[in-house]
Image: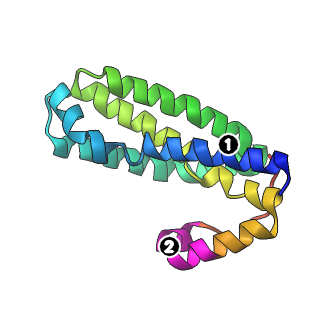
Amino acid sequence: MGRDQLRVVLALGSTQTIAWASSYYLPAILADPIAHDIGVSSTEVFAAFSISLIASAFLGPRIGRTIDVFGGRGVLVVSNVVLAFGLAALGLAHSQAVMWLAWVVIGLGMSLGLRPPLAPLPPGLLGWLWWTSASILRSSNPEAMMSWSTTSKPSHG
């Protein structure tokens, strides 16, 4: 693997780790403090988070088509902006309505940036190494088996 490839892999890995930690895994650590600050139950925070997952699922096909047309790079950039906006709104939320809206925005950011834009990118970037690691992951992760296509065409988008 060349230096440029290594730099891209490290950047993508780092940004994906931060994106997952600050969105999908956020309620596991901060649901109680968020609930306390806004004056709602932890259950309501998790319900709002669940809505973000539903929003992400509904937006997925459209975002997938956008990635097919324009590539994943721009979509990843937009996802970071959307996630940052949603997290800022959640951090500033002092009412239930703002909390719920913030989670919907975070759901949009998750749909844009948590894995889908990367699916077509690494095969062209890493070649056989990507397919080997993807095969190992698919065999050990049922979610990955359902969500990753082994027939996707590499994209350099």
For the residue pair 17 and 69, the one nearer the viewer reads as 17
Residue flagged by tag 1: what amino acid is it? Ala
Q: Position of residue 144 (x, y in %)?
A: 54, 69
Quadrant housing the N terminus = bottom right
Q: Position of residue 54 (x, y in %)?
A: 40, 51
Residue lying farthest bottom?
139
Between marks 1 and 2, how big is the CA–CA gap?
A: 24 Å
The residue carrying mark 1 is 11
Which residue shows up at 55% across the image and 51% down it? 60
Horizontally, residue 43 falls left or right of residue 49, namely: left
Lower sequence index among marks 1 and 2? 1
Residue flagged by tag 2: what amino acid is it? Asn
Q: Secondary structure at mark 2?
A: loop
Crowd band around label 2 with a 10 angstrom C-alpha radius: few (<14), some (14–19), many (20+): few
1 and 2 marks in contact (CB < 8 Å): no
Which residue shows up at 77% across the image and 62% down it? 123
Q: Which residues are magenta?
A: 136-147
Q: Main secondary structure of the magenta part?
A: helix
For the residue pair 15 and 150, the one nearer the viewer reads as 15
For the residue pair 53 and 129, the one nearer the viewer reads as 129
Q: Is residue 157 above or below residue 135?
A: above
Which residue shows up at 32% across the image and 49% down it? 50
The residue carrying mark 2 is 141
Q: Nearer the viewer, mark 1 or mark 2?
A: 1
Crowd band around label 1 with a 10 angstrom C-alpha radius: few (<14), some (14–19), many (20+): few
Q: Is residue 128 above or below residue 43?
A: below
Q: Position of residue 91 (x, y in %)?
A: 34, 25
Q: Secondary structure at mark 1?
A: helix
Residue 138 forms part of the magenta stretch: yes
Residue lying farthest right?
2
